[in-house]
Structures are given as C-alpha cells and as structure tokens.
Image (cartoon, rainbow, N blue to C red):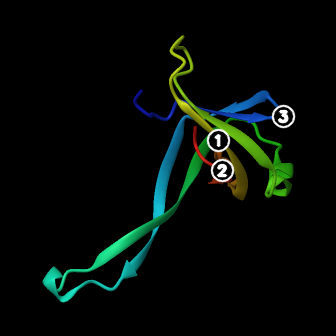
Amino acid sequence: MAINGNNIIIYLNGTAIAGTTSNDVQSSIDMIEIGAPLSSGGWKQFLTKRKSWSVSVNFLVLQYSGVQDLLKVGNIYTLKFRGRNSSDSTGVSGSAILKTCKITSTKGNLVQGSFQFQGNNALS
C-alpha cells in the first residue's frame, strides 16, 4: 500500500472522526554510539534501541468554528493507515497523542491548520 494524503483515518473511541488529505509520516529509532575496536578503521558503530513514529496532518476547511480543537491536545486517538475505498485489509494502525494543534485564521481567507500526533505505542 502506498501512503498518500488520503490514507489516514483518525478514530476517537472507535468512531471515525476525520480523514486526511495531506500529511507527513515519520518513523525513527534511537541509537547509542558504542566503542569500536581499533580494527574498525575509525568508523563509528551503533546499537539500536527503541522506535517511535509521528504524523503531521494539514487541513483546509470552508467553514470553521472549531477553536475548541485547541483544547484537545493530550487526547489519545487511533490512527489507521490504509486505503479508504479498498477492501484490502493490509495497513497499520496505532495509538497516538495529539501533541500540537495549530489554526491559522485570516479574515477573507480559508482557515488553515495542522495537527501533530505522537505515536503512543507500536504500529501494528
């Protein structure tokens, strides 16, 4: 499955509350540099530790009265990564904490904003 801006659905208490149209997905791993023997030729060596993931979601809406969204930081959501119109059951999901909510409102323009989610467990 290719990840595109249309493949992340956000759930709260088992109910789909939002879908994305634009997003950035990132996974990473902690690494610790270890002492290498002199035979390594001066190259660094590392041990891998724990993994993490995060998602940044952008949105653009025509009508917006959701200033209350700013209060939802800290809530835990389920994010599912899979095609919306597909019977394909492949994909991944995981629990994520809403870390940041940013809303940009300019008189005479569409409201823009972004949400940042921090993974709270493994993607499975």
Classify 10 Å Cα crowding around label 3: few (below 14), some (14-19), many (20 and above): few
Quadrant where the image shows the C terminus: top right
Q: Which amino acid type is shown beneath numbered disc 1?
A: Gly
Q: Which amino acid type is shown beneath numbered disc 3?
A: Asn
Label disc, if present, on residue 112 of the rendered structure = none
* Left or right, residue 117 beside residue 55: right
Classify 10 Å Cα crowding around label 1: few (below 14), some (14-19), many (20 and above): some
Q: Which amino acid type is shown beneath numbered disc 2?
A: Asn
Q: Nearer the viewer, mark 3 or mark 2?
A: 2
Residue receiving disc 1: 94
116 in relation to 3, above or below = below
State yes or no: discs 1 and 2 in contact (Cβ < 8 Å): yes
Give the x, y percent position of residue 121. 66, 50
Lower position in the chain sequence, tag 3 or tag 2: 3
**Residue appearing at x 52%, y 40% in the figure:** 22
Give the x, y percent position of residue 24. 49, 48
**Residue appearing at x 65%, y 38% in the figure:** 79
* Left or right, residue 53 beside residue 74: left
Quarter occupied by residue 3: top left
Pick the front one: 4 or 109: 4
Pick the front one: 93 or 32: 32
**SS for dot 3:** loop
**SS for dot 2:** loop
Residue receiving disc 2: 121
Residue receiving disc 3: 13
* Left or right, residue 1 beside residue 35: right
Identify the residue at the far bottom of this view.
Answer: 38
Q: Nearer the viewer, mark 3 or mark 1?
A: 1
